Amino acid sequence: MNRDNFRMKKLTAEDLDQYNALLRYAFQVTEQTLFESGWEDEDIKQSKFPVLERANVWGYFDGEELVSQFAAYPLQMNVHSQIESVAFVTSVSTYPEYSGMGLMSGLMKQSLTEMRENKQAFALLYPYSIPLYRNKGWEIVSDKMSFTILNHQLPHLRDVPGYVNRVSWENVDFMNLHATFAQKTHGCLFRNKLAWDEYWRWDEDDTTVAVYYKQDDQPGGYMVYLIKDNIMYIKEMIYLDQESRKGLWKYMVAHDSMIKEVHGANYYSEPIAFELEDSAIKESIRPYIMGRIIDFEMFLENYKFNHDIDADVTLEIEDELLEWNNKSFNIKVSEEHGELVETTSKHHAKMTIGTLTTMALGYKCASQLADIDRIKADQKTIRILDKIFINKKPYISDYI
C-alpha cells in the first residue's frame, strides 16, 4: 500500500456504508449477532446515521476506501456539580492491515483539536486497550462493579411507604428521573435521544423498566432489568434517596420465587455487599471509562475545587500529544475556583496529563498517586493537592 494515497477527511452521510462496514468488521458484529438481537443490518445503518449527523467523525482513506475512523459525540456531563460540555469518543476502529501506521494517532490529534475549537475541554471513551490510550494521555476515571446475589441473600426489608409501577421505555417519569439523577450526581452524563438509543441498542424486547413512586406519587428511582433462565439481570438501578433504594430492592425481592440469582452492575464505585444483611455475595470490579483533559486552561474555567480552601500551586504537566497542555500552570485557588496567575508557587508538582485527569475527576487522590510515583512533589504539596481537589469518584454508566 502506498502511504501517498492516504488522506484524512471528515465523514458525511455519504460515507455511512463504509462507516458501518468498518464498525461491523472491527467489532465482529455478525449476521447471527444481529439476528439474535432482533436487528437487521439496515436497522444498524439507520441507527448510526444520527451519529454521522451529530458527531464529528474523522477518517483516513486509502484512495476511496475508509480504513480508519474516530468519532466524537457531544454530550453534557456533571463534573463536581458543574455542567460541562464534553465529547464521548466512539466508533474507534481500523482495519488490521493498516494498524501500526500512526493513523489512529493522527485521527485522535485531529479530533481532540476540533473538540478544543468546539469549547469541549474534556473527553471520555470506553477503552479497547488501556495501555494504548494511556500512552496518548488518557486515564481511568470510573469503575464498573458486577455482582451476583443468590435469591436467599436478597435483603428482607420492611415495608416502604411508596409503590412500584412497571412502565414503558418512553415513560416520561423514567426519562426525567435520569435527568434529575444526573443533575445531582458527579460524573453522570445527560442523555439525549441518541444516548438513549445507544442505551437500548442490544437489549431484548422483554427488558422491563420499573419506577419507584413515593407516597406523594413523585418518582424516586428506577430499575431496568431482564428475567431470563431464572436469573434477573439488572442493567441499571438509580435512586434519588434511600427510601427509593429500599423500595427497588423490595420490588426485587418480590421476584424471589421466580429467580435463583440476581446479576447486576453498579457504577457508584462502592461495593454493595456491606449494605446487605448477607454480605457473602460475589462482587468484581474492573476499570470502565477513561477520560482526558483536552485543554487544561479551558477546563479550569468552570472546574470546582473544594470549598473554603485557599491555596496556590504550580503544576508542571507533561502532554506528549497536545502541546498546549505541555507546560507549567501557576494556579491560585480561592472560593472553589481556580485561576491562572503569573507567579510561580513554591508548591510544585510534576505529573502527566492523564494523572491530572484522574485526580481532577476524583478517581484517585494526590497521595495515592504519589505513592505509586505518578506525582513528583514534596509532602506538603501533596497535602495541598489532597485538600483542593474533591476526592469523589464519578458515576458513569453510559457507553456510546
Image (cartoon, grey):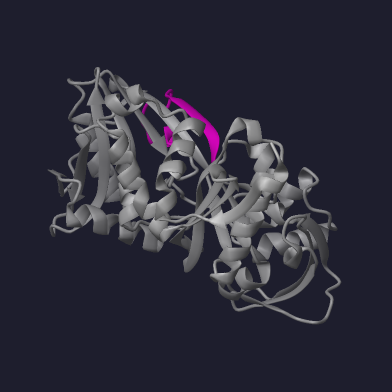
- Is-magenta flag for residue 274? yes
- What residue sits 83% from the left and 74% below the top? 345
Q: Which picture quadrant has residue 127? A: top right
Q: Position of residue 2 (x, y in %)?
A: 71, 40
Frontmost residue, 184 versus 194 = 194
Frontmost residue, 327 versus 331 = 327
**Relative to 287, 367 lies left or right:** right
Total count of labels? 0
Q: Which picture quadrant has residue 295? A: bottom right
**Relative to 139, 221 lies left or right:** left
Q: Is residue 123 visible to us here?
A: yes
Q: Is residue 237 visible to us here?
A: no
- What residue sits 44% from the left and 49% below the top? 15
Frontmost residue, 187 versus 387 = 187
**Relative to 209, 111 lies left or right:** right
Q: Is residue 69 above or below residue 9?
A: above
**Relative to 284, 210 lies left or right:** left
Q: Position of residue 303 (x, y in %)?
A: 58, 70
The part of the chain drawn in magenta is 271-288
- What residue sits 63% from the left and 52% below the top? 7
Q: Position of residue 362 (x, y in %)?
A: 59, 55
- Is-magenta flag for residue 283? yes
Q: Is residue 17 above or below residue 107?
A: above
Q: Position of residue 265 (x, y in %)?
A: 40, 35
